[in-house]
Image (cartoon, grey):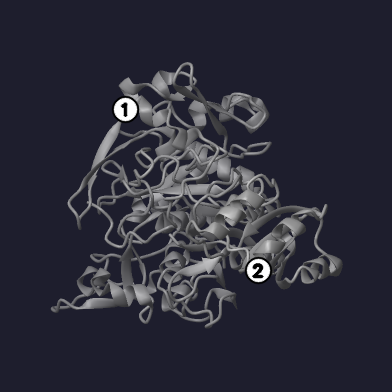
Amino acid sequence: MTRLLGCSALALLAISAFAQHPKIARDLETLDQNSMVDVIVQYRHVPTEGHHQRVLALGGMLRKQLDVIKGGHYAIPARALRALAQDPDVVHISPNRELQASVDVTENAVNANIAFSYGWNGTGIGIAVIDSGISNDPDLKNASGGGALRVVYRQDFVGGGTDDHYGHGQPVAGIIAGNGSSSNGSSSFLTFRGLAPNANLINLRVLDQNGQGTDSEVIAAVQEAINLKSQYNIRVINLSLGRPVFESYTVDPLCQAVEQAWKAGIVVVVAAGNQGRNNSQGTNGYATILAPGNDPYVITVGAMNTKGTPSRSDDVITSYSSKGPTLIDHIVKPDLVAPGNRVVSLLASTAQLQNQYPLNAVPLTSYETTGSGALSNEYYTMSGTSMAAPMVSGAAALLLQQNPNLTPDQVKARLMKTATKSFPSSSIATDPTTGIIYTSQYDIFTVGAGYLDVWAALSNSDLATLSAISPTATYQASTGQVYVVNSQSAVWGSSAVWGSSAVWGSSAVWGSSVWLNGSSAVWGSSAVWGSSAVWGSSAVWGSTTSSSAEAVGIAINGEN
């Protein structure tokens, strides 16, 4: 893993050596030239033994083949990076970056209860959970709670087995596919059920007991999901993890891996990140989407607060949900939002998070008769976009159960078009720990195309005929406004993007509330959105990265 050092003479020499090389990532510039560094090298073609030997000749070694991105994970002396970059077959060299892990009333909040009444439960769909592992649990067995476990495949990429020793993968799995059998008691109690309670899970463990992992491990897991697609009918990958954006998605190896999964016919769902309160760059939390959620192919999910009620009418955006546009490429993200605040799901009883925050366990009185104040050994409450992403993964599984012929683009487009688009202009949230009050505005970079509505998506029959990649935003300094275009510079919503301007036009997908007075400008009026200094900030629209960005955190206590 890459270890970034302070400003020393060696670091300054490294900057001088590498700053202008187009094939070397910027965050490799400050390395001690005498150190060994873990890198991911992308080639023009899948690397051969000859490519590995060239790295060996430079004092390096192959750690892992990453054929899915035509690359490999290598250890190599930092002083040899420039020589490696001279290889004409090398496309890009990146550090092996570190990343982290970023149902009760939520079932009604996304109208999944209606879907269940019609028999849609994810049967036959495989969902790869690339996370901190999944432990055995009655709620992950057949729908009745007995019989075979629906975790049909397990693989460990970090060492230590495939169980969840951190406490993040287990609740993610429960939100996707928990059947609620441990809480399925009297009708007067809650049943904590996932969105696709009979789907199969593929457990690919990439985060250790501290919730830490690296790009190469996640890429290897994505590669394995693609390899296992036919065997287990893997149609969805859930990535409730992330790290800061350091370079364009076009060369970022993590983004390139998820794109390959998408092109292989797998819907990839990614957490947006929990940096919506980050004002370290003066952006009020804008431009804080994490990788690989910055990739335009994937479905990037922000977090809503259900306020602890089954009704959608009082739901608001969480203040910590990361906002777009993305750094460097300025992709419009998130794509949509889903419940992610104080979500009840499965508890990993021996995991670090649950031991560190034991009071987040659910009271037994919520799902069974008891006279004590004991806490559950089965269910736990967590918050964050990491909990919102599996809501969308479960919803995607229901759509694919209903129509197995849907492509990832069609799933994404339908979820976005049918998302609820009625929002207030602003809302406030209070951090229960600090008491700090945060104000959120409901623009296109905060709520995307809207709030997940499972039943509306299942009731819709529209089919996008072309790509559903997320559009790009562009800032016009002369007017102080922001416009949305696609990669071909056509205004978003044109038939060239969605296949039918009547079906996929801007008002159909995004709604009118996130556009400025219904015009083509989506951002920029200080009268509507606040300070124009934020929208015109070079921290948002510049070409460099933000050094203060953090990885996906766990918002354990949520917000009020």
Residue 402 point in image, percent of width and height: 58, 52
Amino acid type of the residue that numbered disc 2 sits on in the rendered structure: Tyr
Does residue 54 lie above or below 317 as drawn?
below
Rate crowding at label 2 as few (under 14), some (14 to 19) or many (20 or more) other CA atoms within 10 Å: some
Corner quadrant of residue 266: bottom right
Closer to the N terminus: mark 2 or mark 1? 2
SS class, disc 1 = loop
Residue at image x 51%, y 41%? Answer: 326
The amino acid type of the residue labelled 1 equals Gly
Q: Which residue is mark 2?
A: 232
Q: Report the mark closest to the observer, 2 or 1.
A: 1
Residue 103, percent across and down? 36, 61
Instruction: Measuring from the top left, give residue 300's x and y in whole percent.
Output: 50, 48
Task: From the viewer's perspective, tell me whether residue 21 is left or right of residue 244.
Answer: right
Q: Residue at x 36, y 25 (%)?
A: 532
Please indicate, yes or no, whether residue 402 appears anywhere in the rendered image. no
Residue indicated by mark 1: 530
